[in-house]
Image (tube, grey):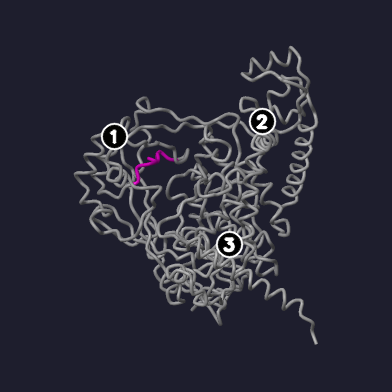
Amino acid sequence: MPGPSAVYDVIVIGAGHAGCEAALVAARSGLSTCMLTLKAESIAHMPCNPSIGGPGKGHLVREIDALGGEMGRNTDRTYLQVRYLNTGKGPSARALRAQSDKTQYKRAMRETVSATAGLEVVEDVAVEILVEQGRVRGVRTLGRGELACRSLVVTSGTFLNGLIHIGERSFPAGRQGELPAVDLSDSMRHLGIAMRRLKTGTPPRVHREGIDYGRMEPQLGVEPQPKFSYLSAAEDRQQYPCYLTRTTRETHRLIRENMARSPLYSGAIKGIGPRYCPSVEDKVVKFPDKESHPIYIEPEALDTVEMYVQGFSTCMPEEVQLAMLRSLPGLENAVMLRPGYAVEYDAVDPTQLWPTLECRKTLGLFFAGQVNGTSGYEEAAGQGILAGMNAARRLMDLTPLVLGRDEAYIGVMVDDLTGKGASEPYRIFTSRSEYRLLLRHDNADRRLTRRVLDMPHVTRERRRRIEDKLARIERELARLRNVALAPSNGVDEALRRLGSAPLSGRRPAAELLRRPELDYSHLEMLGYPVDPDLPMEISEEVTLEVKYEGYIRKQQRHLEDFRRLEELRLPQDMDYGELPAMSREARMRLEELRPTSVGQASRIAGVRMSDVSLLIGWAKRLQLQDQDEDEAPTS
């Protein structure tokens, strides 16, 4: 028989990227925290591509770091290669991506978890969420029985009723070699939580010795080596190349001839897969005009011979996978160490959650990560730190933290999920934001660190650094606007060498810096005094603020209109039937999703502009009623 119940402030189910962020922020806030996992050795495991960052995702990692999270620092400690992507698409789209050593990443995160005071790792299986009078009170486990808590964060990943498919074979698993969580999924349904079936997948792994790298195009890291975390020190580390190859006509022929054996097309898989990370079968079927697709060969870790085949996710039979691999240039003699597979799993309908990621039906119950219908380590970690902070803030009597679409990509993601749902695995992109120039990769700490200074997990060093950075940016911006340069033969000659027009009169440095062909490093050449001790990250941020000042001001004007809609609150018990002119579809969607503001309602599919106009009038009327009640004299 299990012993007496253990009591924690916060319990986190799952130890993936969402679980780690949630548990760490709760424990670092001084709360007794339990991380419940099947195997402690699987903490922060990377079952798919061992990379962090990329378009949109790199922005998320910077935001996690700015909020006091761990993913950025752990990546900086363990990467094999780091480089910028989308450098030609402007500052809003530029993103940092690192190829991690998955063994070192897990080890480093386990060490961080173990060294965190107040955080206990328990190896057990969660089988039931315990709720009493609409409030979570704990979780029942297979081995220890009841574990009591005041807040519970579920980060179960792909384990809920997980089912793996490889060709004609299928078997229960959350991921390869690990059992699914069937009872926990049933418990959630019993609580009235609506679920849906989703699917994701992973490619085969190949032996590094069976690859002809000379037939591929090397992809190298950049120097100096940039960092994800604002707290990481610069260092010069050996970097390892990735390699680019492409699918061929033979690859496509093999896929077409064996399509009936793919569970994706045989009908065996019912779950909906990710639109933006499709299997190679899907690519061939959905893009028949494409003669080839890029495939990247990437190292998984220094202590393994396995290489990851990015862009080659598949669930074909094993012998077909091997033939497909050997049709790729450079992989003619490939040795397949592990086949690719697809996994189906249950996910929560995230429209049942508040923007804090707390369940609308159950106080103290939070969900984060793939269980909410997202894909990717970064999306999971972003939700994890938000859910963990709000689980902690609830117990610390602090106002819940809600990040707006104008403040963070985490805010964009959570607003999309809770307002629109996830009919397919959700992935963040910079294009999902209306305010991309405000949500740049470089300024995440300026946007977000001040939002969490009321929490004890924010270290003294982080507080000092953000205060120092903000002061230095403001000083440098003021100096660039005030220090001017007069035209001269030397200045005009230097401008011509830089491909820029000569001065027509005395001009401040900020005005010249707006020219597309000039950057901060050119100012000293032109005779402007510069601060030699100004760090590169600050000079780059100052440059972007100056260059895009007009565009930023325009987005801020749009933002004022957006905020006005967000400030028009909608009561949760509102009777949408009282709005007779509203479209039937809008009424149904609003009754179902219960938006908290007119702004959120305007982003729901099926709600038209005429419906939004009705809501604006109704919300303003409610505002006036509330003001009248507040101003009414009391007897």
Instruction: Report the quarter where the C terminus lies.
Output: bottom right
Q: Which amino acid does the dot numbered 1 rest on?
A: Glu
- Of residue 604 and residue 239, the one placed in the foreground of this image is 604
Residue position marked by numbered label 1 in the rendering: 291
Q: Quadrant of residue 513?
A: top right
Q: In this rendering, which labeled residue sits more in front, label 2 or label 3?
A: 2
Spatial CA span between label 1 and label 3: 44 Å
Alpha-carbon span between mark 2 and mark 3: 40 Å
Q: Which residue is mark 2?
A: 514
Rate crowding at label 2 as few (under 14), some (14 to 19) or many (20 or more) other CA atoms within 10 Å: some
Residue ID at (79%, 37%): 475
Is residue 94 found left or right of 326 in the rendered image? right
Q: Is residue 12 left or right of residue 465?
A: left
Instruction: Find the distance from the CA under tag 2 to the CA under tag 1.
Output: 42 Å
Q: Position of residue 265 (x, y in %)?
A: 25, 53
Q: Which residues are magenta?
A: 304-313
Identified at 67% across, 18% down, the residue is 495
> What type is the residue that disc 2 sits on?
Arg
